[in-house]
């Protein structure tokens, strides 16, 4: 333990909630194993150091990334944001890392752990002769799908329209996905192809890959990954089971809803949240509201300010919606999601299938309704609905009748009971993997030993 104590790990998250959470959870996990932690972060979405007094924080200049990130509100081409970060953070990151290496007298810097999306960091780490581990914050299935899809050819699968007859057909390169899913992944296949190539090359060049997943969930994909990425892989997730996400929340979580949940019957509440980035149109927003009203169950709905395109917050709700719903429905700006999912009143999770949300739902055995928006979400959603069969896909978007029927399938039908059984089984598997001797427990020990050996 004494030698470990003197070792420092430097971490560098992508500045979005779904990436900051797992990176800071990982930092906490490694800290409890005796490592000192330094977090390098962009100015945009900087974590609050007072929530992590045991870490040191080093901000770097991101060349005005907040202005670029604002574009997400009108254009969901994330590849542009990724490229911007990878091109503009090089010098600030190198300078910061070099300074930290020079200044660290009483402990040894063992390695740097950066988000796999920060592919530029591999060259910087190589230059400074520091091992780099890549943290991949999405699923292994997503990596395999990205690897298989023909992003950079002019094949038609990215150019279909809703009217094309192939829309419902499986994609030959990755049959779990339908053509309609592919269209959602990206609006810029060429940019996505470039990003994926860069990310994969630098993951392969890294000293190891850390995955926020657990072996039993993605066992078959893990085998393929081990062949495609012959660098050491560590599957010690789900990270939030060691440390909750609340301390890295960028928006204040509304905790008043816990006492409301306490008053609801067991497994009766429909929890609705589309994460920190996804957007919906005004008409989709209204359809969600009508669907929730018509199904007649209690609901807790997270509406982030700015989530509805062209609205500040709730202006586009149907007239008198909140008055009509009364105490049956609660709308909040941001929830303590993990606690909501753990709460016995929560019956299902209508989600965009961000990977953190998907894992959080699996860990609590809460069945999902899948409404993915973009990038990895359509892939996660297909795994949830068609492979693990622990949720139902809300096919073809937001429309009140479809919403009502889908919620009923999960909450009231026999199909819902079967889904609940399957996800409860996975919940048990998670717990076993985290227990002493389990696969995640073992993988964490392997990671600690590996980093200690640097
Ligand atoms: N989250 C939360 N409160 C909310 C909604 C989400 O704390 O009201 C957290 C959630 O628990 C998860 C993260 O925000 O850890 C969202 O990450 P995810 O990968 O699911 O989606 P993203 O926001 O990246 O699209």
Image (spheres, helix red, strand yellow):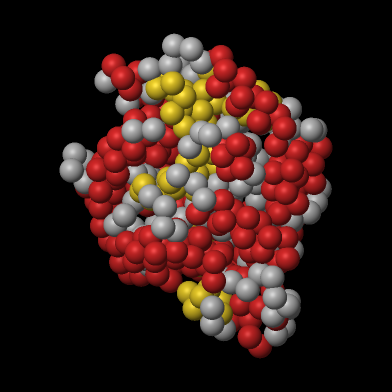
Residue at point 34%, 64% (across, down): 223
Residue at point 38%, 50% (across, down): 233
Residue placed most toward the observer, 303 or 236: 236
Q: Quadrant of residue 254?
A: top right
Task: Please provide percent x and percent y for residue 182.
Answer: 62, 71
Give the answer, above or below, for where 36 lies relative to 66.
above
Give the answer, above or below, for where 88 lies relative to 158.
above
Task: Please provide percent x and percent y for residue 156.
Answer: 70, 81
Residue placed most toward the observer, 202 or 17: 202
Residue at point 44%, 11% (across, down): 106
Residue at point 34%, 58% (across, down): 217
Q: Quadrant of residue 157?
A: bottom right
Is residue 397 visible in this depiction of the protein? yes
Task: Please provide percent x and percent y for residue 192.
Answer: 68, 61
Task: Please provide percent x and percent y for residue 250.
Answer: 60, 30
Image quarter (top left, top right, bottom left or bottom right) of the N terminus: top left
Q: Residue furthest left?
A: 437
Is residue 398 visible in this depiction of the protein? no
Give the answer, above or below, for where 50 lies relative to 244.
above
Image quarter (top left, top right, bottom left or bottom right) of the C terminus: top left
Side of 148 relative to 358 (left or right): right
Q: Residue furthest bottom?
A: 165
Side of 340 relative to 351 (left or right): left
Side of 275 relative to 297 (left or right): right
């Amino acid at each position: 333990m004494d030698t470990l104590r003197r070792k420092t790990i430097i971490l560098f998250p992508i500045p979005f909630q779904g990436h900051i959470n797992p990176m800071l959870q990982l930092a906490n996990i490694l800290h409890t194993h005796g490592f000192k932690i330094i977090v390098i972060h962009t100015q945009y979405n900087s974590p609050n150091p007072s929530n992590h007094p045991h870490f040191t924080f080093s901000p770097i200049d991101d060349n005005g990334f907040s202005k670029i990130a604002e574009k997400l509100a009108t254009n969901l081409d994330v590849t542009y944001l990724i490229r911007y970060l990878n091109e503009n953070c090089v010098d600030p990151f190198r300078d910061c890392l070099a300074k930290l290496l020079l200044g660290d007298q009483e402990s040894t810097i063992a390695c740097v752990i950066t988000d796999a999306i920060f592919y530029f960091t591999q060259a910087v780490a190589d230059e400074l002769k520091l091992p780099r581990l890549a943290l991949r914050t999405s699923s292994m299935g997503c990596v395999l799908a990205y690897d298989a899809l023909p992003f950079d050819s002019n094949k038609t699968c990215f150019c279909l329209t809703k009217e094309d007859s192939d829309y419902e057909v499986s994609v030959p390169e990755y049959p779990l996905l339908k053509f309609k899913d592919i269209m959602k992944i990206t609006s810029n296949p060429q940019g996505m192809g470039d990003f994926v190539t860069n990310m994969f090359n630098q993951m392969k060049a890294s000293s190891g890959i850390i995955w926020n997943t657990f072996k039993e969930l993605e066992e078959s994909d893990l085998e393929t990954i081990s062949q495609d990425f012959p660098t050491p892989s560590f599957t010690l997730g789900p990270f939030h089971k060691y440390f909750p996400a609340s301390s890295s929340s960028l928006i204040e979580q509304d905790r008043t809803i816990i006492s409301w949940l306490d008053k609801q019957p067991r497994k009766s509440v429909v929890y609705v949240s589309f994460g920190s980035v996804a957007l919906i149109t005004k008409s989709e927003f209204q359809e969600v509201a009508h669907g929730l009203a018509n199904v007649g169950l209690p609901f807790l709905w997270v509406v982030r300010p700015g989530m509805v395109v062209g609205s500040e917050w709730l202006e586009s709700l149907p007239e008198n919606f909140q008055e009509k719903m009364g105490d049956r429905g609660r709308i909040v700006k941001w929830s303590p999601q993990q606690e909501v999912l753990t709460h016995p009143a929560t019956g299902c999770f209508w989600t965009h299938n961000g990977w953190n949300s998907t894992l959080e739902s699996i860990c609590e055995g809460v069945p999902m309704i899948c409404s993915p928006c973009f990038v990895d979400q359509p892939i996660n959603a297909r795994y949830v609905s068609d492979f693990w069969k622990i949720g139902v896909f809300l096919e073809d978007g937001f429309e009140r009748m479809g919403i009502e029927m889908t919620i009923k399938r999960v909450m009231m039908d026999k199909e819902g009971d079967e889904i609940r059984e399957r996800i409860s089984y996975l919940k048990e598997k998670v717990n076993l993997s985290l227990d002493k001797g389990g696969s995640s427990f073992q993988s964490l020990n392997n990671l600690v030993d590996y980093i200690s050996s640097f």
